[in-house]
């Protein structure tokens, strides 16, 4: 896929350009995702009144992740044709157009197409941001954490203002306003630095080897970033009253989630030592899994906040762990792990509502905890016996 060519030395552009590009491109992704972030509390509540079934809502919330599974690899290969800056610019423009389309009420199929386009845009923006980050030669772990925190700022904006905007302006004008704000991301993309590409394109088939690390990333993504998010309305809906009030409560919890996703990686990036990141990653993964047991017992609020915080660290540093294990070919490895993560999120978003109706809260949460715990123990044992675990 993408490997460093002979004779290439990164020291020629290892200064401020890649660091500035990593942080600025994260800002582009953050602003471009405003509309997508708000769909997760909006569609489960208002989707039925728009004529969408539970399966249709799950498909709309997951199709962008399905398309990212092959998209991660192809976007990484496409960097050789477009360059990092141009890929981020094109993807940001497409993201703005999809946000505008969410408020047009064009029907299910146009909505589905917009979600597919957004999925490809996200792959392009994420690949560009990672390409800048991988060119940073000093404090790379810190840059990973800070850039991931910046990427999550858009979710904070969307969850902090989105429910109020939708209630006061309606979906059509609300998404038009968010699309206008996303245009700032396109302006930011215009100022990204042009960093010479240190890669050459070689043939590489997409790999979906079910390694212990890939499987535990898949499982945690499916449960915590897929099933949990689409079922927030069920978890928080008891005694909330009107749908508008429910959207507000969901928006509040998603605001907490996005704040943790933004703040914790930045704090860890600034204060943590690079060598301690794998240990912190494993600890947060385990605590997040165990919190599903508390969720099954009815401790909804504290359990959700604990899961959000732990998953914030896991999500932020999954690419770093992949890079840490395979330094010779980091971008292909990160793209592969990202595909497993996106596969988990897609399956979780697609099946989450159906699984809730089939199993109920207690059985579903207990089943997910036990399954993820087995995947975690398998990953830890394999990591002790064989390094790297990918």
Image (cartoon, rainbow, N blue to C red):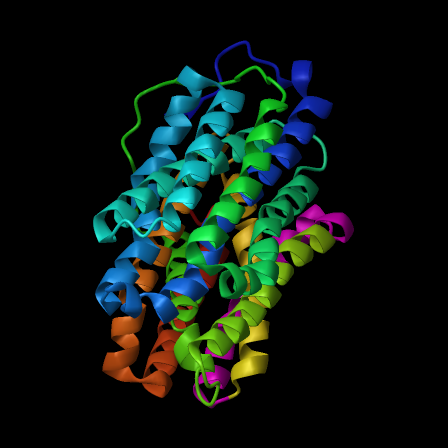
Is 292 part of what is drawn in magenta? yes
All told, the count of numbered labels is: 0
Query: Farthest residue in the top direction?
Result: 7
Residue at image coords 44%, 82%: 237
Residue 358 in the image, given as x and y percentages of width and height: 23, 80
Rendered location of residue 256, percent (x, y): 61, 67
300 part of magenta stretch: no
353 left or right of 98 in image? left
Q: Is residue 81 visible?
A: yes
Residue closest to the eye, 380 or 313: 313
Residue at 48% across / 71% down in the picture? 247
Residue at the image position 62 percent from the left and 30 percent from the top: 188
Quarter residue 372 falls in: bottom left
**In the image shown, does 300 or 334 lie closer to the viewer?**
300
Residue 155 location, x and y as percent? 56, 54
How far from the left and from the top, in percent, is residue 81?
40, 16
Q: Is residue 83 above or below residue 293?
A: above
What residue sits 25% from the left and 73% below the top? 354
The span picked out in magenta is 269-298
Magenta region, main secondary structure: helix
Q: Taking 335 as reference, is 224 above or below it? A: below
Inspect this view and state whether residue 287 appears: no
Q: Is residue 21 left or right of residue 351?
A: right
Q: Quadrant of the N terminus?
A: top left
Front one among 30 and 390: 30
The answer to whether residue 363 is left or right of residue 128 is left
2, above or below 369, in the image:
above
């Amino acid at each position: 896929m993408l490997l460093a060519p002979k004779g290439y030395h990164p020291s020629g552009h290892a200064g401020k350009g890649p660091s500035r590009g990593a942080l600025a491109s994260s800002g582009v992704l953050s602003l471009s995702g405003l509309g997508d972030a708000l769909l997760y509390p909006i569609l489960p509540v208002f989707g039925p009144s728009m004529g969408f079934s539970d399966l249709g809502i799950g498909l709309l919330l997951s199709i962008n992740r399905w398309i990212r599974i092959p998209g991660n690899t192809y976007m990484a290969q496409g960097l050789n044709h477009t360059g990092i800056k141009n890929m981020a610019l094109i993807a940001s423009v497409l993201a703005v157009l999809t946000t505008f389309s969410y408020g047009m009420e064009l029907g299910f199929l146009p909505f589905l197409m917009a979600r597919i386009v957004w999925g490809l845009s996200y792959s392009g923006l994420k690949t560009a941001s990672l390409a800048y980050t991988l060119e940073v030669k000093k404090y790379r772990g810190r840059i990973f954490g800070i850039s991931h925190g910046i990427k999550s700022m858009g979710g904070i904006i969307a969850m902090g203002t989105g429910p109020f905007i939708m209630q006061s302006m309606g979906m059509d004008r609300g998404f038009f306003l968010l699309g206008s704000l996303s245009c700032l991301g396109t302006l930011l993309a215009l100022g990204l630095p042009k960093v010479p590409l240190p890669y050459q394109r070689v043939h590489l088939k997409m790999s979906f080897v079910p390694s212990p690390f890939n499987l535990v990333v898949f499982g945690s993504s499916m449960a915590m970033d897929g099933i949990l998010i689409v079922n927030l309305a069920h978890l928080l809906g008891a005694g909330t009253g009107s749908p508008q009030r429910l959207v507000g409560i969901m928006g509040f919890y998603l605001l907490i989630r996005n704040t943790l996703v933004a703040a914790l990686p930045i704090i860890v990036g600034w204060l943590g030592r690079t060598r301690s990141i794998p240990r912190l990653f494993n600890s947060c993964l385990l605590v997040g899994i165990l919190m599903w047991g508390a969720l099954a017992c009815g401790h909804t609020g504290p359990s959700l906040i604990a899961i959000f915080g732990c998953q914030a660290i896991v999500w932020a540093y999954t690419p770093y762990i992949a890079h840490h294990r395979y330094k010779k070919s980091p971008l292909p490895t990160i793209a592969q792990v990202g595909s497993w993560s996106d596969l988990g999120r897609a399956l979780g978003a697609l099946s989450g509502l159906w699984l809730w109706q089939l199993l109920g809260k207690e059985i579903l949460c207990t089943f997910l905890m036990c399954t993820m715990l087995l995947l975690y123990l398998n990953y830890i044992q394999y990591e002790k016996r064989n390094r790297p675990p990918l």
